[in-house]
Image (tube, coloured by chain):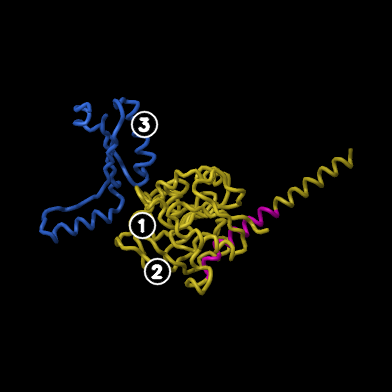
Amino acid sequence: MGPRIGVVTFPGSLDDRDAARAVRLAGGEAVALWHGDEDLRGVDAVVLPGGFSYGDYLRCGAIARFTPVMGPVLERAADGMPVLGICNGFQVLCEAHLLPGALIRNDHRKFNCVDQALRVESTDTVWTNAFASGQDIVVPLKNGEGGYVADDATLDRLEGEGRVVVRYVGDNPNGSYRGIAGIANERGNVVGLMPHPEHAVASLTGPGTDGLGFFASVLTALLHDREWETTRKATDFTHDHETVARA
Amino acid sequence: MARVVVDVMLKPEILDPQGQAVAQALPRLGFDGVTDVRQGKRFELEIEGEVTEERLAQLRNAAETLLANPVIEEFTVRVEPWARASGS
């Protein structure tokens, strides 16, 4: 069976079904998680989808961040579990301080809805290993509060450590500092981005299939881990066996 | 009963598109002489009983945790004088 990818639904989530569909199209098993869940049903990774959780009241993602499901998400993310935050999910990850910086209202104050060109700048994350470094992709971008902001020291650190995962190509669509569309944590298991890869997984319903790479990447990473686990267990067994034989 | 007010403002270095929109609308309506506008949030918290230092510390913690995002915002917490004086 393919790896199990949890997709969280908060009150006001919009893109949970598309995210689950993207997981399935990439070959994984999508597991629905509810904001009130206290455990993650044994999933191997989690997607926080787009939408307007809690009506974007207070600040985007500010209330979703404190839901019961976020407890185990934060805990396991710290242990290396892959987490992808898309749009509102990215805002939740920033509010939870799992990723640095914050998202504010677009500088032009209008809601954006475009097929957006992006450059994949880091392929050293579990969510982008399927891309070539510097590859240009097109996925939909749709939000009102997508301006990525952080202080200069944080921005310099992100750039220096190769943690700018995707950057806008062409005109900056929302005033994001340094054209940043998505970033990763230090370990590369947590990625947040404003554009929506889950809407670019089939040419009938999106601008193409470039978004599939994010979901294919995590499946590759998880299967690789699983193979490694299996190899390690087999090796342990051999060692035990040898020990027994020698005894 | 007392009232504690938490004022939240974007840090000066963070762009405020809403404030800019207001700043641009003012002269259009004939209100001249305003050189800049920053828009913030004000929370009025109705508190049971007396606002002790300990209580106030808790509320500062609440402001830092939920009401404001310290990454982009700064905040002040204060007891509303009239609410405290009235004692109601």
Marks 1 and 3, Cα distance to the nearest angstrom?
30 Å
Residue A63 placement (x, y as % from top left): 41, 46
**Residue A44 visible (yes or no):** yes
Marks 2 and 3, Cα distance to the nearest angstrom?
44 Å
* Residue placed under numbered mark 3 in the picture: B58
Instruction: Examine the residues drawn in magenta and state their main secondary structure.
Output: helix
* Residue placed under numbered mark 1 in the picture: A145
User: Which chain contains the residue that carries disc 3?
Assistant: B
Q: Secondary structure at mark 1?
A: loop
Question: What color does chain A have in the rendering?
Answer: yellow
Badges 1 and 2: C-beta atoms under 8 Å apart? Answer: no
Whichever of labels 1 and 2 marks the residue nearer the N terminus, that label is: 2
Q: Residue at x 50, y 63 (%)?
A: A198
Q: Residue furthest bottom?
A: A204
User: Which chain contains the residue that carries disc 2?
Assistant: A
Pick whichever, B74 or A75, lies toward us.
Answer: A75
Q: Is residue A75 left or right of residue B15?
A: right
Q: Residue at x 35, y 61 (%)?
A: A174
Marks 1 and 2, Cα distance to the nearest angstrom?
14 Å
Give the answer, above or below, for where A4 lies relative to A138: above
Pick whichever, A122 or A17, lies toward us.
Answer: A17
Could you classify mark 3 by the number of other residues whose Cα lies within 10 Å: few (under 14), some (14-19), or many (20 or more)?
Answer: few
Q: Is residue A172 left or right of residue A79?
A: left
Question: What color does chain B have in the rendering?
Answer: blue
Amino acid at dot 3: Gln
Give the answer, above or below, for where A105 lies relative to A201: above
